[in-house]
Amino acid sequence: MKVSLFVTCLVDQLCPNVGVATVEVLRRAGCEVVFDERQTCCGQPAFNTGYRKEASKFAKRFIEIFESSDAEAIVSPSGSCTAMVKHFHELFPDEPEWRQRAEKIAAKTHEFGSFLVNVLKVEDVGAASNEKITWHDACHGLRDLGIRNEPRKLLKNVKGAEFAEMENADVCCGFGGTFSVKYPEISAGMLDNKIEMIEKSGADTVVACDASCLMQINGRLSRIESKVKTKHLAEVLAS
């Protein structure tokens, strides 16, 4: 299957290793991966803060770029950015043509782990690790896209790894984009609760499929000098 990589801003700018790992795993699963360097932000920050008109400009740009590809699917290593594409149609209540184009693009767009399990029907990508790992359910992936079992199936098939289910794995880490900026005290309190659950799991690595959650969690872990590491799902599966 030919796949177009929707890399996302955070991965492109801060976590390029995640993008590389995503491509490696997709190729291992038999995909031909293409990347359009013209892609920019999907507009999620503007959308989430109420700037719908501005967000629609990003959406139109995204749609035009990915429409020009003959790839059968668009795959992203981010639940939140994938979810944003699924909401594009809401930006065009009075523009039926754009709404239709948005819905067509959304139907082709998949979160990385979900794509492997639900589209390619792959649960074992040949990964190996000696780590004890736990999983954090990012809010958009779980609540907006309904992704829960897919990453767990993939992680439990990593040879040599021990999977430890985290208590309250589905509870928010407190990032929420601009939420953490507007309400830093609440965000920090939520994050501390998440860190407590991570350490309680006994895992030496916490895994997620959103760079924003991993950035939030890793920031606190580093400040308290914890030995627990953070990894994106693609990095674990590429090992």
Image (spheres, rainbow, N blue to C red):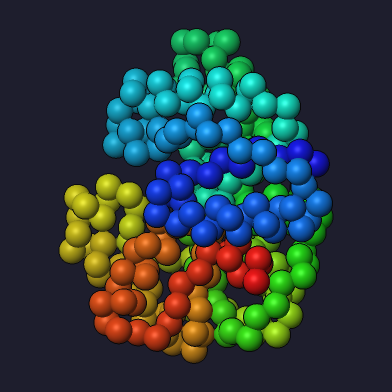
Residue at the (65%, 80%) spot, across then down: 129
| Closest to the observer, 102 or 60 | 60
Q: Is residue 129 left or right of residue 27?
A: left
Residue 98, x across and y down, in percent: 54, 15
Is residue 61 visible in the rendered structure shown here?
A: yes
Residue 17, x across and y down, in percent: 52, 59
* Image quadrant assignment for residue 189: bottom left
Residue at the (50%, 69%) spot, across then down: 231
Q: In this view, does 59 lie above or below 221?
A: above
The image quadrant where one finds the N terminus is: top right
Q: Is residue 175 left or right of residue 131?
A: left
Q: Is residue 120 left or right of residue 180?
A: right
| Closest to the observer, 238 or 184 | 238
Residue at the (44%, 87%) spot, across then down: 200
| Closest to the observer, 73 or 152 | 73
The image quadrant where one finds the C terminus is: bottom right
Residue at the (48%, 22%) spot, across then down: 61
